[in-house]
Image: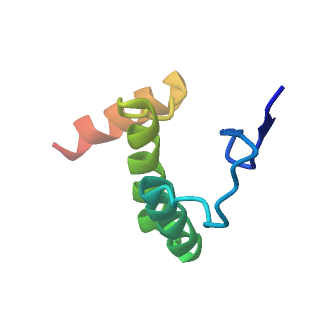
Amino acid sequence: SKNRDKYGREKDGNDDGLAPALDVQETIHEIHKFGSEGFTGVQKKSHTNSEYEWLTGRTAKRQKIPTKIVVGMRRKAMKRE
């Protein structure tokens, strides 16, 4: 039975003393994640949406607005016109 290293790869007895190869994509993602911790407001929302799209391949659904509020907004819009 073979052991596994911290990356989940099988480790055999032939350890050549080299450091494990870096996963470039994972490293880039970690850097972006660290850099985005300071985002606030619209920038944070935009980043969250782009990260969701990157993970799932589709855009996030908009938050639902209660029907009563939507009806009120439409009535106000009609009065303004």
Image quarter where the C terminus lies is top left
Q: Position of residue 19 (x, y in %)?
A: 62, 66
Residue most extreme to the left: 81
Q: Position of residue 27 (x, y in %)?
A: 50, 62
The relative height of residue 47 versus residue 58 in the rendered view (above or below) is below
Q: Quadrant of residue 77?
A: top left
Q: Is residue 32 left or right of residue 2?
A: left
Residue that appears at 44% across and 31% down: 56
Residue that appears at 50% across and 34% down: 63
Q: Position of residue 12 (x, y in %)?
A: 72, 41
Q: How many callouts does the rendering have?
A: 0
Which of 20/59 is in front? 20
Q: Is residue 63 left or right of residue 2?
A: left
Q: Is residue 79 left or right of residue 45?
A: left
Image quarter where the N terminus lies is top right
Q: Position of residue 57 (x, y in %)?
A: 36, 31
Which of 32/73 is in front? 32
Q: Is residue 3 left or right of residue 49?
A: right
Q: Check the image and tell me how it is coloured.
A: rainbow
Residue that appears at 48% across and 52% down: 48
The relative height of residue 51 versus residue 61 in the rendered view (above or below) is below
Which of 16/33 is in front? 16
